[in-house]
Amino acid sequence: MLKTLKYFYGTAWRERPFYLLFLLASILLNAGQPFINLILSKYLLEELVGDRNTEILLWIVAGIVIGNLLFLSLIHVARTNLAKYDDWFERYFYDRLSLKSMTMDYPLTENPETLNQRRKADEGMAWYSGGMKGLSESIQLLFSYALILAGVVSIVAVMSPVLLIVASFAVIGGTFTVWQTGKIQKIEFEKFPKVNRAFGYATRNILEVKFAKSIRLYHGAPMMREQFVNTTKKCSDIFYYTANSIGRWNCVGSFVNFLKGLCIYGYLSYKLLTGTIGIGDFTLLAGASNSLKDSLQGLLNQLQEVHRKLNFMREYVKFIDTEDTHRLGTQTISEKTLPVIEFRNVSFRYPSMQGYVLKDINITISQGQHLSVVGLNGAGKTTFIKLLCRLYDVDEGEILLNGVNIKNFDYDAYIKELAVVFQDFKMFALSIRENIKLGDWEKEVREQDMENICVLSGLAQKVEALPKGMDTQIYKYFDKEGIEPSGGEMQKLAIARALYKDAPIVILDEPTAALDPVAEYDIYRQFDTLIGGKTAIYISHRLSSCKFCDKIAVFADNTIKEYGTHEELAKMPDGIYAEMFKAQARYYA
Ligand SMILES: Nc1ncnc2c1ncn2[C@@H]1O[C@H](COP(=O)(O)OP(=O)(O)OP(=O)(O)O)[C@@H](O)[C@H]1O
């Protein structure tokens, strides 16, 4: 709990120290204001039933009015400033959450527990706690009540100690009910994020354009509606349970409150009627007893509220603090040395899988070598690339770059060495220029470079035909003149983005799968110009592409089964490559 408190107010102290100053001011002002009315009302009443001195009466009334005005104005200033900061903190913490989601270790992005935790972090900071704003509101109330309580306890203890006992009993009852409702909300919070994620998938994610075709051509709409109905029912069950249980405890709370009023006013009326106290003290004690009960109740409630909110907000800290092991390396990379990649006894299995996807992989890709990686579906070719890209850590063995384990390199520096086009690459709802620029965001854009890249990747004709050229938006999310590129055009864009990165290692996973034969031929023809003297890994099921690579690695049975040039492998008796090549060649014979 303290760790969470420290995390949020430590951040506030670092980022916006004045926030804490306004918080303190707000606490003191809120605590001070009730005492003006409480004390001055006593003197006002005593003067009214006593001497009725006009001048004194005017001074007391002026004191009440001016004191209240002053306090309320200052409270307003403090609150307005706090509201501005609260807004800033809301964006700040959301930004941290997004950043963490985008940069955390890749395997976590497909781990349902992490995804649930992310949802808990999001919801824990939103409606369950109200985030920094919600927490600070409770902290303000907590300390204001504590100060008010200290003041009224002093007054009541001196004037009528019995009232302290009555108020304390009422508070114990009230606190118990608040504690119960807090427990019920906690139960809801444990169940709800998981159900809500399923609900979000069935109602929001599924409406995205990328699902539109499959929904229409398969049994998508009824199936999703069924999921919608099921998850809605689960959400309703959870809400019904919460509302019903909290409602019962609220009734208990109201009854305890009624009993408390009855006891306090009964006791004070008795003292007034028997002449033990005057009307001024009656007013002061009635007000102080109410304040005592309210502030003690408020204090205990806010203690629970702060505890409850911190519990929810702790889920955010848990998510933000998820350990990132992929970023532990610190070694820099010499730009002058051309890369040599070595897989040494590498074995790997996906966290969710029993067996190895890759076992005992040993291969060296020398400087400037062009390696073709082939194999049947599911043989582990893309996994081989993912390991090189540090998306996953190897389970056994090591991958070396120029003799150094790739884990030791600073992550960002290492990623700069790679220009990769994955099979399932994604384009963003940005302009064509910006999508290409993502290859190297820091590099100053040179128009000539962009044009050359468009020509090399086969995009030039398409871009020239567009009224806004390179500034055309991909997709129609934000611009109705945006384009929906075809699969092949997307692939050309992805190749352009990789070329723009100009990294010393180029990895292309099925780069021509969506290209027409002419575009594919162009890519093959220009392969040397595209890749130049860089080290390249090329995955393709079209074995004709292997001819322009120096070496071919054939993946089968979770390992590299064959390795050599096209000529060597094509004539291997009973060779896997020879078999696959012959099978493909038959169609073109
Ligand atoms: N994230 C993942 N979690 C669990 N298993 C995975 C994951 N990604 C891939 N696999 C499994 O690992 C095996 C190898 O997949 P991989 O994508 O490396 O094959 P591939 O040789 O590239 O196949 P293809 O030629 O079809 O692209 C497959 O059985 C696949 O189901």
Image (tube, helix red, strand yellow):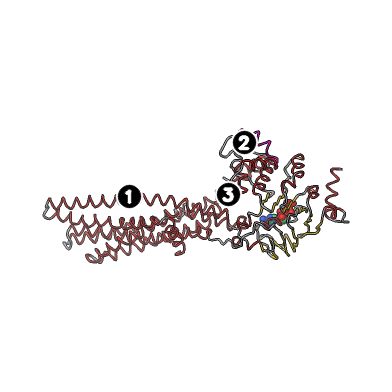
Identify whether 518 is placed above or below 242.
Answer: above
Q: Which mark is residue 76?
A: 1
Q: Amino acid at mark 2?
A: Gly
Q: Which mark is residue 60?
A: none
Distance between the alpha carbons at the discs numbered 2 and 1:
53 Å
Camera sees residue 182: no
Mark 3 — residue? 442
**Image x and y of residue 577, in percent:** 83, 53
329 or 66, nearer to the observer: 329
Give the mark nearest the N terminus, 2 or 3: 3
Q: Is residue 469 magenta?
A: yes
What's the magenta region?
458-470
Mark 2 — residue? 469
What's the residue at 62%, 36% (across, down)?
469
Distance between the alpha carbons at the discs numbered 2 and 3:
22 Å
Q: Is residue 280 left or right of residue 476?
A: left
Q: Residues within 10 Å of mark 3 (few under 14, many from 20)?
A: few
Q: Main secondary structure of the magenta part?
A: helix
**Image x and y of residue 298, in percent:** 35, 59
- Secondary element type, mark 3: loop
Q: Is residue 286 left or right of residue 174?
A: left
Q: Quadrant of the N terminus?
A: bottom left
